[in-house]
Amino acid sequence: MPAVFVSEIEEITRTALVAHGASASVAAEMARAVAWAEARNNRICGLYYVESYCQQLHSGRVDGTVTPVVTRPLASRVEVDAGNGFAQPAFATALEQAIDAAKETGTATVAIHHAHTCTALGYFTEKAALKGMIAIGMTNASPIVAPPGGKTRVIGTNPMSFAVPDGKGGVAMAFDQSTTSVALGRITMAKAAGEAIPEGWAVDANGTPTTDPDAALKGSLTSLGGLEQGYKGWGLGLMVELLASGMTGGLASRDVKPLKAPTGAPHGLGQFFMLIDPSASAAFYDRLAALSAAASEDEGTRMPGQNKRLQDPVEVPEALWDLMLSLTDGPAHADV
């Protein structure tokens, strides 16, 4: 496998997106998000997604040139119309205004609508934490989850993310996870590799537990907690659904078309964020320090995201890197 520096991943992604119709500024922000994911071994949200971005830029399913429109209808609410463009530049455009709102009111929400899938939510919440805000992020997705005991898909993997500043310009804690037992990409990657999946990840179209990734993709993923206690993740998934669609005006999961389909209607997704100013409480950083010390007291334990070693260079499968090279030539030279 080629070992590729993160800076090279960022550059080749930027070049590929521009070649397929993205503006320089949009491509740059998306390339930073892809490189961020690859450095954290989040392959599902990194280079794995770039071909889809290029296909959808070329077909017009996503607008790579739009300028997001930011408004502040309430003192504590910032709204962003992504204009059927990518979510990352929409959030970046609104972030400073959202931070101002959080500092004024203590807590502010950011409601993005008419957006493309945001892939790694942690990229967004970390941005806010690095600027001193506690950040919570949520989004929904195309339907792949049935209620526990059922077989009719109602919601998506519906991830959520949480990031906390350390008070010194860094991040003290961060996690980004779906509300299902596993991310959908893990199933699709298992299918591509011809591998079985662990029991408990999914059920087939009849609601029967399966280890066949193809049957899982035709059926439903289990909510966090698996077959026995999936009601716990189901509740979280419904919470994300209501906030990500109801508080943004984005599509409900049941109306979202397959996210990686090259053509079709824009995703129409909503992303919902809460920014909290920790300085509103004099006790926050004392409590954070005490909790961090307790969480790392035993050998090998830590707060989520703490002391995480970033990869640079990154090992990239040769076929994937070859695909990236072809994408830089634009749609006339690639299978898009």
Image (cartoon, rainbow, N blue to C red):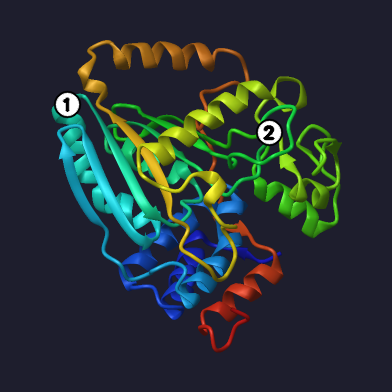
Q: Give the CA separation, mark 2 to mark 1.
A: 36 Å
The amino acid type found where label 2 is placed reads Ser
Indicate the quadrant where residue 107 lies: top left
What residue is drawn where x is 54% and y is 27%? 236
The quarter of the picture where residue 151 lies is top right
Asked if the residue at tag 1 contacts the one at tag 2, i.e. Cβ–Cβ closer than 8 Å, the answer is no
User: In the rendered view, does 274 fall on the left or right side of 291?
Assistant: left
Which element type, helix, strand or loop, lies under badge 2? loop
The structure residue drawn at horizontal position 21% and vertical position 51%, both measured from the top left corner, is 70
Q: Position of residue 251 (x, y in %)?
A: 45, 48
Instruction: Indicate the position of residue 133 as horizontal and vertical percent values.
Output: 29, 32
Residue tagged 2:
181
Is 7 in front, or is 188?
Answer: 188
The answer to whether any part of residue 161 appears in the image is no
Residue 208: x and y, percent?
85, 35
- In the rendered structure, which amino acid carries the disc numbered 1? Thr
Q: Which mark is residue 105?
A: 1
